[in-house]
Image: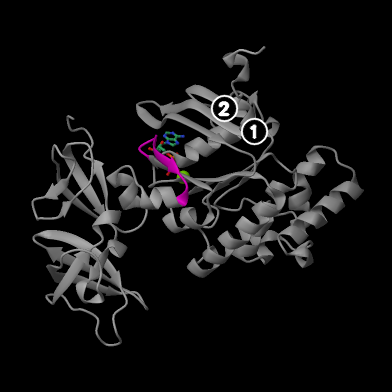
Amino acid sequence: MSSNLENRPDDAGDYVVELQSVSRHYGDTIAVANVSLGMTRGELVCLLGPSGCGKTTTLRMVAGFVEPTSGTVRINNMDMTHLPPYRRDTGMVFQSYALFPHMTVAENIAFGLENLKWNRADRDKRVSEMLTLVELPHLAERLPAQLSGGQQQRIALARALAMRPAVLLLDEPFSNLDAQLRVRMREELREVIRGVDVTTLFVTHDQEEALTMSDRIVVMNAGRIEQIGSPGDIYESPESTFVAKFIGWCAVVEGTVDSTGNFMSKSGINLSGSWQPGSASAIVRPEQVRISSEGAFGTPAQARVVESHYYGGATRVILEVNGEHLMMHERFPFGRHPKPGEALSITLNTSEIRVVPTPGTPR
Ligand SMILES: Nc1ncnc2c1ncn2[C@@H]1O[C@H](COP(=O)(O)OP(=O)(O)O)[C@@H](O)[C@H]1O
Ligand SMILES: [Mg+2]
């Protein structure tokens, strides 16, 4: 016979990386406040948030370059909180590549293996595996200065993965690359990570990077976790206006949820639902706003174009409806892009609009 207690699954055992209430203070600055996070094997998790929100500090506490003021860092079920980086089974890729300039590509990749006293033959074999993995086998004898930025970053990734670490850590690894290369590199990185099945923690302030690469996104704000979820959760069900504004475009409409659970704004945007009564904000995504002639949802409203920005293909339009600003992404017929001041009739997809409580208001 077993008691309930014995049957309880050992959650901790399922995590490769586990942060338990981790904080880091610098004098009066609270860089990271009470962050808890568990990562399962092979998972790719992004820390996403504006500059200064504590992403790098969190990553460096996992790596061991920064010691937490309080809390516990566990890797492979062992308490690593006070162990030095080289004993943590992690590999790190920095924003600035940080390759050793006087060493060849092959020597860079072999560096950690050499420290572990691997013999020559095993070392060469692993280096060649890693160069194949990042698809640069012909560059083994080059020096870092003879490589492009994208190639240097691939070599930095190869070096980090050469030790087959349990955890791969990357801090804004593509921010020094141009826009097109950045998109290609994140697709490649995703492939490589899937191939070697390494648990990965990735820091970025780029929402598109986070949405396209992650299994889960951790949105941070002022040292705290604001929300954790899949890219779909975070984009479609943001729990705060902070998350909504940080991920994708949106307009925030302030209003009130009445005692029956319906939302209404002063400007007359009314949404029926069963939200918690009190002061609230509706989060209106551009794709929830449509030109009413397209036979879309709801009663048409009259809108005035405030701004119009052509993105090639689609146009982003800022609209004013009863004193409220909304945003719309539309493909307009050739030569028919709306101009500021123009009137448009629009409808809202009210069933998809999120309503969140205004922070700090009494319920
Ligand atoms: N070594 C340090 N000394 C003092 N303050 C620091 C140090 N490292 C980070 N901070 C502060 O902690 C906060 C979070 O920094 P960081 O983790 O680098 O943010 P992010 O990577 O999200 O931009 C910032 O306010 C930053 O100035
Ligand atoms: Mg940073």
Answer with the quarter of the image where residue 52 lies.
top left
Answer with the quarter of the image where residue 221 lies.
top left
**Which residue is at the front of the view, 230 or 124?**
230
The answer to whether residue 275 is above or below residue 20 is: below
| Residue 222 counted in the magenta span | yes
**Which residue is at the front of the view, 319 or 301?**
301
Q: Is residue 88 visible?
A: yes
Quadrant where the C terminus sits is top left
Q: Residues within 10 Å of mark 1 (few under 14, many from 20)?
A: some
| Residue 20 counted in the magenta span | no
Whole-percent x and y of residue 11? Answer: 58, 27
Residue occupying image coordinates x 19% and y 49%: 272
Answer with the quarter of the image where residue 330 lies.
bottom left
Identify the mark nearer the N-term, 1 or 2.
2
Q: SS class of the residue under badge 2?
A: strand
Quadrant where the N terminus sits is top right
Q: Is residue 65 visible?
A: no
- Which amino acid, by three-letter code, is at mark 1? Pro
Q: Residues within 10 Å of mark 2 (few under 14, many from 20)?
A: many
- Which amino acid, by three-letter code, is at mark 2? Val
Q: Which mark is residue 85?
A: 1
Q: Which residue is mark 2?
A: 73
Q: In the image as oriented, which residue stretches furthest toward the front? A: 1
Q: In the image as oriented, which residue stretches furthest toward the bottom? A: 335
Query: Magenta residues?
Result: 221-231
Residue occupying image coordinates x 81% and y 42%: 114
